[in-house]
Amino acid sequence: MATASEGHVSEEKFCKLLPKVELHAHLNGSISKETMTKLLARKAHLPQDQQPDTQALQQWTDIVENGKAVSLDACFQMFKLIHQIVDDTEAVAMVTKDVVREFAEDGVCYLELRSTPRDVPQTGMTKRSYIETVLKAIQQCQDEGIDIIVRFILAIDRRNSLEAAEETIQLAEDYRAKSGGVVVGVDLSGDPKVGDARQLIPLLQKARTAGLRLALHIAEIPDQEAESLALLNIPTDRIGHGTFLHPEVGGSQGLVAATENHSIPLELCQTSNFVGKTVASFDEHHFKYWFDKGHPCVICTDDKGVFHTTLSKEYHLAMMTFDLSRKQLWQLSERSIDFIFADDDVKQTLRKHWTNERSKLQL
Ligand code: 5GP
């Protein structure tokens, strides 16, 4: 795990040295520029009409690097493009190893990666080989001594069928046992404008009963009160985004009450929400609403590649926008340990590490 050095360091450096927990990271959204270059090089031999749209990728990078907002639809177009490039197990292995290493280099000590298992018949990749490749890459990172604990969450894409969701949950149950607890849960993500997640509730309840934990994207866009309430009341174990839960933004007191009654932590991704234009400015981010209430908040990246960010940058952004002290950032990162899906032994290991690092940061 990353070790903090002593002394008076800048706020940026402090955020990097701060030991961190990342709980909301989509594998294919987390691909760095460097890895993208390697992935594109693997496609260079293809005829022109089968080449990935590198121009679109470049345009996106230029816009996001300049700190501009785009739209949620444009974000989903990017994922489509990335999936065309990450289409075989070799690419999945490369992406997983690079992403894990990059999070470790950013001072992340515990990472929950999530990804949607995909079949690509043209390359022979199946959902099972996809999952096994990710698990093997995680193990290889550990064997190579990369100092980070990684767990894996299988994602259901809400654009896909009920049968596909059922299959993903079955796979999560299978691999939870086979992976010795590396697979810890199920995510629900994908374009929030598509479908009604209420149809998935019996499946999600079954997954939870089987011991899987739920990390569900909820209220990412406005006007989803009934769906959001139903998902909160499963209850989900964590909320992805939760941007439109509270009444000030068109949510409701009922949604806030359900979140508070079940004490469900929120995974908050500031840059992602700004670029996707679901929040108008950083200071209007719902972090403030929930943080001021003392409700469990976990700062996360979402898609560090697509949104050109790091977890350190997200902590720094919260610090600058909401005028948080170093001590408050420390408390946020340390409290995040309570909300991980790994078992109590891992929590104890992490808490010990945080205790060791604290004095080095002069807190
Ligand atoms: P993957 O599951 O392929 O590893 O990561 C990319 C996928 O994650 C996207 O296709 C999408 O389903 C999901 N995803 C990534 N970021 C977001 C987000 O901000 N909101 C939602 N709803 N889904 C996302």
Image (cartoon, grey):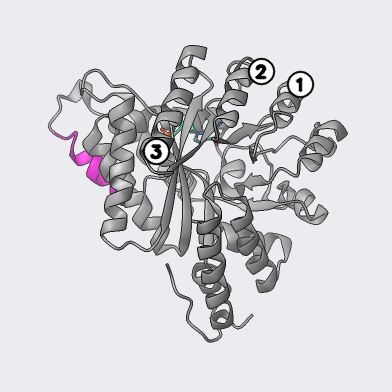
Decide: marks 3, 2 in contact (CB < 8 A)?
A: no
**CA–CA distance in space, label 3 to label 2:** 26 Å
Please provide percent x and percent y for residue 235: 70, 32
Q: Is residue 41 magenta?
A: yes
Q: Which residues are magenta?
A: 34-44
Is the CB–ligand 1 distance for label 1 below 8 Å? no
Q: Residue at x 33, y 40 (%)?
A: 134
Give the amino acid type for the residue marked by disc 1 in the picture: Ala
- Confirm whether residue 86 shows in the render: yes
Q: Secondary structure at mark 1?
A: helix
Closest to the observer, 147 or 220? 147
Give the amino acid type for the residue marked by disc 3 in the picture: Asn
Please provide percent x and percent y for residue 79: 42, 31
Q: Residue at x 33, y 25 (%)?
A: 127
First of labels 3, 2 by sequence position: 3
Residue ID for mark 1 = 226
Give the class, few, some or many, for how many residues have Cα within 10 Å of label 1's Cα (few <14, many ≥20): few
Q: Is residue 201 left or right of residue 140?
A: right
Residue ID for mark 2 = 198
Decide: marks 2, 1 in contact (CB < 8 A)?
A: yes
Give the amino acid type for the residue marked by disc 2 in the picture: Arg
Residue that protrudes farthest toward the left in the picture: 45
Is the CB–ligand 1 distance for label 3 below 8 Å? yes
